[in-house]
Amino acid sequence: MPSKRSDIDSFLAMDVLAEANRLKKAGRPVISMAVGQPSHPAPDAALAAARAALEHGHLGYTDAFGRESLRVAIAEDYRARMGIAIDPARIAVTTGSSAGFNLAFLALFDAGDAVAIARPGYPAYRNILKALDLKVVEVDANAGHDFTLTPEALEAAEKAHGVTLAGVLLASPANPTGTVTGRAALKRLADWCHDRGTAFISDEIYHGLVFSGEEASALSFTDEAVVINSFSKYYCMTGWRIGWMVLPEKLVRVFEQLTQNIYICAPDLSQIAAEAALSERKQLDGYCDIYRKNRNFLTSALPAIGLPVASPMDGAFYAYVDVSRYTNDSLAFARQILHEANVAVTPGVDFDPENGGRFLRLSYAGTEAEITEAVERIGNWLPSR
């Protein structure tokens, strides 16, 4: 019997990473620009706290929403960095941001509800929504809308699809485009959702990685949004699988009950390390300086080898490049680059099922040496196309 979920698409970035790892194991000198994996380890204080916990501590279940000390520390971080006061009771520690999205979709929507996401956008949004029998409304986030979601674009999408949106999910900075939605635009969107009673989910996992424009949290404008964040990107803790949500007060108990039944709690060791990581902004900002240098290099280097950047690289650590002069099949093109140039990149069809055949995403979260060498390899390979 075929699986009920056989229509769920693959997450191609992870498929590419798996293939790149197989080639590396076979001795190939592959450089990966395929996934948003910082090249640096977790910050020193996080590693020290984890070592101490392993040696001396008792690791076990925590409250479903996580250690109280971590939630208080996250709330204090919002106050110190953004001037936003948040009751720690509204903060839920999660098993990575992925668990946050699962919980948000389950808590906020019923089967058949329509939820808007940007196209191009993170493929797991689309796939999780589909797995939960929700209607995915992909809205073209093009230059005419500053590469983000706007009330006008959402209203046009409702009309085109014949739906009323139950929810809107926005990422800023965005994956794969790097778009940063400014304060005024973010407030307009939050107000639009509030006025209509539409659930608003703000993906802020790339906060701290803004190189141009205004970094803003939806929490600056509303207490009704579900805000999802993570220790994976800025804090370099992808493998620790630890994130958090800030919830509307009226939904706290609903999310808590779902967490208790689905996840029990986030890993205790990761929570201990994450709390320590919050104190390491000086070290982490030093890592960001490397990403900034990589970004500045790619801004000129990619067009010079024939890969024009399709959207401003305002934040995160991705370049979304136009390869239409070479191909309309970005998946096959990415495989060629991997096997012939020993560089792993992600096909645009991962992020945009309609137009992604003409684009690739390149992550610049690696070292300066890796990024420079990868561009040189691709530049030497492209003339043979």
Image (cartoon, rainbow, N blue to C red):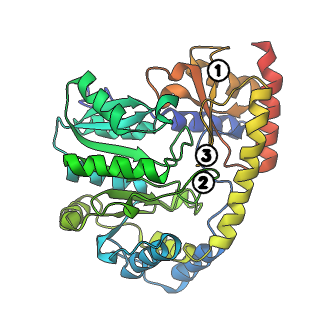
In this view of the protein, can residue 342 be seen by the observer?
A: yes
- The residue where tag 1 is placed is 323
Residue ID at (37%, 40%)? 125
Residue drawn where x is 34% and y is 76% of the image: 88
Mark 3 or mark 1, earlier in chain? 3
Tell me where residue 360 appears, x and y as whole percent. 60, 28
Residue 198: which numbered mark, if any? none
Looking at the picture, tell me which residue is in the foreground, 144 or 140.
144
For label 2, the residue is 210
Circle 2: residue type:
Val
What is the spatial separation of the Cα atoms under label 3 and label 1, in whole angstroms? 20 Å
- What residue did someone put label 3 on? 314
Relative image position of residue 124 (x, y in whole percent): 40, 40
In this rendered view, identify the residue nearer to me: 144 or 47.
Answer: 144
Left or right of 114? Residue 358 is: right
| Amino acid at the residue labelled 3 | Asp
What residue is rendered at 56% in x and 73% in y? 277
Q: Which of 15 and 1 is in front in this view?
A: 15
